[in-house]
Amino acid sequence: MKLLRVGAKGTERPALLDSEGVLRDLSGVVQDIDGALLADDAALGRVRAAAESGALPALDAAGLRIGPPLARIGKIVCIGLNYHDHARETGAEPPAEPVIFFKAADTVVGPYDTVLIPRGSVKTDWEVELAVVVGRTARYLESAEEGLAHVAGYAVAHDVSEREFQIERGGTWDKGKNCETFNPLGPWLVTADEIADPQDLSLRLWVNGELKQDGTTAEQIFAVGEVLRYVSQFMTLYPGDVVNTGTPAGVALGEPDPKPFLRSGDVVELEISGLGRQRQVFAG
């Protein structure tokens, strides 16, 4: 299933994109798309049955905002330097263990919402990422297979980063990762049953129409299942938590000087095969 949330910010309602590409209203079946829904097999079964019945009301998509596909996100755990090609382009050694940092849930916006360049920023960068949405409580998982069994679904994430804040200002990476609007998510939450192999997905990103990132999750140093297993050794993952799994090569940080960091008015488009496409205008 392709689940999404539509409407004005703060008043989104649940919806579903059916197999014919028609947007359907789910508000008569479930209250919202969140961790509680993803952890409730019976509720998900009702959604599936409603989708298969063909009885869900169609929505007019014209002019309808698409919000983040997940409400009430608990935490966003991010994995840094998780692609071999990205490590090479930045001159970093591939990590022996996953690099973990966090983004606050309030950085999440819709896939077509405006992204704000922070005050004083001169090094705002792009990063297309596969986001993993947790569907079952995960603690001390013992295998990558167990990790995959705890995935509810997948989505496109844009891990927008401010590199000066992240790298040059001391402390942790978090200062460069948690600026307002720095995690567009969506358009859809695609349930795990639709993704045969999360290590066989193509990721692409364009800036002002120029292809910048063209990678594959096959390049991940730590695969999705292993990432969830590893993270669960240090913290409990709950339904509705999100894990951003890293970005492939092609970011501004990896380009020769002068690096083409984002400026007000730039347009970034990004997509992952089977998970949809985003488009953001950056504003200062």
Image (cartoon, grey):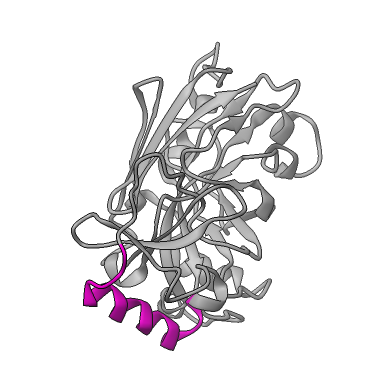
Q: x and y percent of residue 135 in the render?
A: 49, 75
Q: Quadrant of residue 172?
A: top right
Magenta stretch: residue 225 in it?
A: no
Decide if residue 103 is in sight here.
Answer: no
Residue placed at 26% from the left, 73% from the top? Answer: 55
Q: Quadrant of residue 44?
A: bottom left
Picture layout, residue 69 above or below residue 142: above
The chief SS type of the magenta part is helix
Magenta stretch: residue 44 in it?
A: yes
Residue placed at 29% from the left, 81% from the top? Answer: 49
Quick one: 9 or 78, which is closer to the camera?
9
Q: x and y percent of residue 111 in the render?
A: 47, 43
Q: Which segment is the magenta one?
A: 38-57
- Identify the image quadrant of the N terminus: bottom left
Left or right for 163, reference 274: right
Q: x and y percent of residue 270 in the render?
A: 39, 37
